[in-house]
Amino acid sequence: MSEPETSVVIPNWNGRDLLEACLGSLRRQTYQDFEVIVVDNGSSDDSVQFIQTNFSEVKVTRLPVNQGFCKAVNCGIKLARGKYIALLNNDTETHPAWLEELVGALRENPRIGFCASKMLNFFQRDRIDNAGDGLSYYGYNAGQGEADSGQYDRTRLVLSACAGAAIYRRELFSDTGLFDEDFFAYYEDIDLALRAQLKGYQCLYVPTAVVYHIHQATSNRILAKQFFCKQRNICFVHLKNIPYKLLLKILPVFLALHLFVSFSYFVKTKDLKTVLRIYWHVLKAIPTVMRKRKVIQVHKTVPSSYFESVTGPFPSLFSYLFKQRKK
């Protein structure tokens, strides 16, 4: 039996109602040289039985409990046989040409290490959900919520791909490592992208690779956990990956913004416990994070000037808040 050129890895947690649209759309792909691996994250619904009954071609591996997005996709990556590895959220429906366009982009651009899809809102398909990821203190999805009027129809280099619909060369993972499982979920794709960029791997946004996405269909069930992970993990992203000169430059604004976001959450929810947990976990993790940072920075292959060119300039605090208010 020949090895597939591409492996598609899908993490799943209680996503029974989402799987028919997701897996069914993969059956309709114009490109067919791929395998599908679903990693079930300790679901308590009948997700696994549904897949085995209705999508027998899909390989399923089961984790005993929900160990997070990072652990699940890492498990799938280790099982994958393809030289290209695509990651796909279970709350998506792929356009028939999605995989063909991503694989084609990697074939045609040997310097590209990974690619981002054009993600549209599942329910409003004339609205952008993600057109490549960037970093401006916090990570952001380019174009999110905008009407799709062709402004994101140009192939371009971006900082990162949303791991909900992306493709990677296998050697990128061998070179940079897998997703950081200490993140559990959120910003793990930005973290991986920064590590990859520091090793010289570029990311290409492919607008013809279209995916329809139900935004945060899984994570909206656990809002406090989501906020905790986002606030904690964005600290990890900066501490691990940003070169010292740039880190010192942006640190005052980042800290002010981080405290403001945490305070706003507390005012809205009165959930002081989650806020305190964030800063306790960050402080406790600093020795581990700094050990990881040392390895990353020692093995980087690009100068700091290149890194700043792919992140772009960081705005002032007032400019950032004004831009966020306009959204």
Image: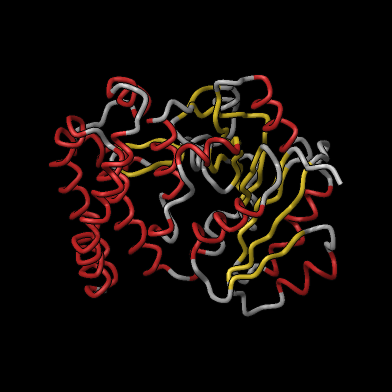
Total marks shown come to: 0
Place of residue 296 in the rendered image (x, y in percent of width and height, measured from the top left): 33, 39
Instruction: Look at the picture and state if 320 lies above or below 79.
Output: above
Left or right of 92: which side holds 239?
A: left
Q: Tell me which residue sits at (34%, 33%) in the image.
A: 299
294 left or right of 88 in image = left
Q: Position of residue 320 (x, y in %)?
A: 26, 38
Rendering quarter of residue 140: top left
Q: Which quadrant of the structure image shows residue 227?
A: bottom left
Q: Quadrant of the C terminus?
A: top left
Q: Residue at x 67, y 37 (%)?
A: 83
Residue 252 drawn at (x, y percent): 13, 42
Work out whether residue 325 can be spotted.
Answer: no
Give whichever of 308, 16 is nearer the camera: 308
Task: From the viewer's side, name the closer residue of 237 and 205.
Answer: 237
Q: Is residue 236 above or below residue 62?
A: above
Q: Is residue 101 visible?
A: yes
Q: Residue at x 85, y 70 (%)?
A: 53
- Could you say which quadrant of the image residue 248 lies in? top left
Residue 111 at x, y percent in the picture: 55, 21
Q: Quick one: 114 or 219, which is closer to the camera?
A: 114
Residue at the extreme bottom = 44
Task: Indicate whether 279 appears above or below 46.
Answer: above
